[in-house]
Amino acid sequence: MKKIVFTALLFTLCASASFSQKFSIGGVHRGGTSPVNKQKLADRFKSEFKLTDDQANTLVTIQQDYQLKSRAIKIDTKTTNKEKKEKLQPIEEERNEKLKKFLTEEQINKVDEVTKEVNMTRGQRQAKAVS
């Protein structure tokens, strides 16, 4: 009987540990920094925004940096939504300045358009999950 209880407890602990690692921030599951995800994102940017290889790789780096910084602010439970928006403003401005250095105005507008669409879709998914 003790062996069965011990085995069940061990199985539960292993399962919960693997589940918690799968959803870590910046990990592969969340579109983190794995080479496969970077390449997929770079290929998507090249085709969608008509970028060169260098531009696409630079855009991936900028986007991932922005996502990590903004995600850290968004998951902070000690700040209000208003404070989060105030903290996100300089990060967005920094991202936009970096984009202006190597993208055309048309490409920047397209990136902003796609970002808004993704955010709207993400918001709809989160609203459904909360319901």
Image (cartoon, rainbow, N blue to C red):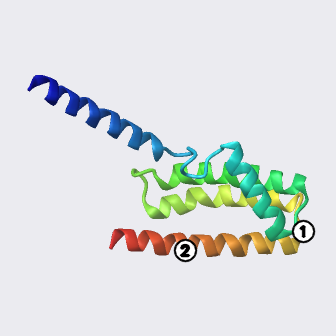
**Numbered badge on residue 96:** none
Where, quadrant-wise, is the N terminus in this rendering?
A: top left
Is residue 44 left or right of 26 when viewed as pictured?
Answer: right
Q: Which residue is mark 2?
A: 121
The answer to which of marks 1 and 2 sits earlier in the sequence is 1
SS of the residue under disc 1: loop
Is residue 84 left or right of 105 when viewed as pictured?
Answer: left
Q: Residue furthest left?
A: 1
Which residue occupies 35% across, 69% down?
130
* Residue 65, percent from left and from top: 68, 48
* Residue 25, percent from left and from top: 52, 46
In which quadrant of the rendered view does residue 10 lie? top left
Is residue 46 left or right of 7 when viewed as pictured?
Answer: right
Is residue 94 at least partly visible in the picture? no
Is residue 20 at least partly visible in the picture? yes
Q: Which residue is mark 1?
A: 104
Which residue occupies 63% across, 61% down?
89
Q: How many marks?
A: 2
Q: Nearer the viewer, residue 60 or 6?
A: 6
